[in-house]
């Protein structure tokens, strides 16, 4: 696994820490989630999505980690939009005390992930 880029996005005092990874094997997925849970201990949610091909079988998955608004699905859509194939994106949210609502949460996760990916593409 290799971390390609990381970013931080703030929406109504909530902080969204986004990391994009290139993954080489399915074991990388659990390692990355464990790393994020340690790195962002104050985060209420660690939502993620990945697209990965192993043994000629394409796997894709998203996880909302209990967050409202299905942000995992949003992250998976972002990976597909930018045509990533062996990648994982993780967004750890530290709640800032102001509720965003279902639509606001989805929008914030989408904006956080897209800004990070666009930054990565610009620096390539």
Image (cartoon, rainbow, N blue to C red):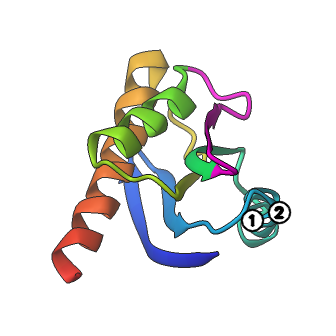
Q: Quadrant of residue 7?
A: bottom left
Residue corresponding to mark 2: 34
Q: Which of marks 2 and 1 is in front?
A: 1
**Residue closer to the observer: 85 or 81:** 85
Q: How crowded is mark 2: few (under 14 residues within 10 Å), some or many (20 or more)?
A: few
Tell me how far mark 2 sits from mark 1, CA to CA: 10 Å
Residue at 29% x, 50% y: name it: 114
**Residue closer to the observer: 4 or 43:** 4
Specify whether residue 33 is painted magenta.
Answer: no
Q: Where is residue 20 in the image (x, y as percent from the top left)?
A: 48, 64
Q: Residues within 10 Å of mark 1 (few under 14, many from 20)?
A: some
**Residue closer to the observer: 66 or 55:** 55
Q: In this view, does 9 lie to the left or right of 52?
A: left
Residue 74: give its label. Answer: none
Residue at 65% x, 31% y: name it: 64
Specify whether residue 63 is painted magenta.
Answer: yes
Residue at 45% x, 50% y: name it: 13
**Image quadrant occupied by the C terminus:** bottom left
Residue 28: give its label. Answer: 1
Q: Position of residue 11 (x, y in %)?
A: 37, 46
**Residue closer to the observer: 113 or 21:** 21
Q: Where is residue 115 in the image (x, y as percent from the top left)?
A: 27, 57
Give the magenta part as a residue range.
54-68
């Amino acid at each position: 696994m290799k971390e390609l880029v990381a970013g931080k996005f703030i929406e109504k005092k909530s902080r969204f820490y986004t990391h994009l990874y290139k993954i080489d094997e399915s074991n990388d997925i659990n390692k990355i989630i464990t790393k994020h849970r340690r790195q962002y201990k104050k985060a209420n949610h660690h939502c993620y999505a990945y697209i990965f091909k192993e043994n000629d079988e394409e796997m894709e998955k998203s996880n909302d980690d209990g967050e409202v608004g299905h942000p995992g699905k949003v992250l998976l859509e972002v990976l597909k939009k930018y045509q990533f194939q062996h990648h994982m994106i993780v967004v750890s949210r530290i709640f800032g005390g102001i509720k965003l609502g279902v639509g606001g949460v989805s929008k914030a996760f989408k904006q956080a992930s897209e800004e990070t990916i666009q930054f990565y593409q610009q620096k390539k």
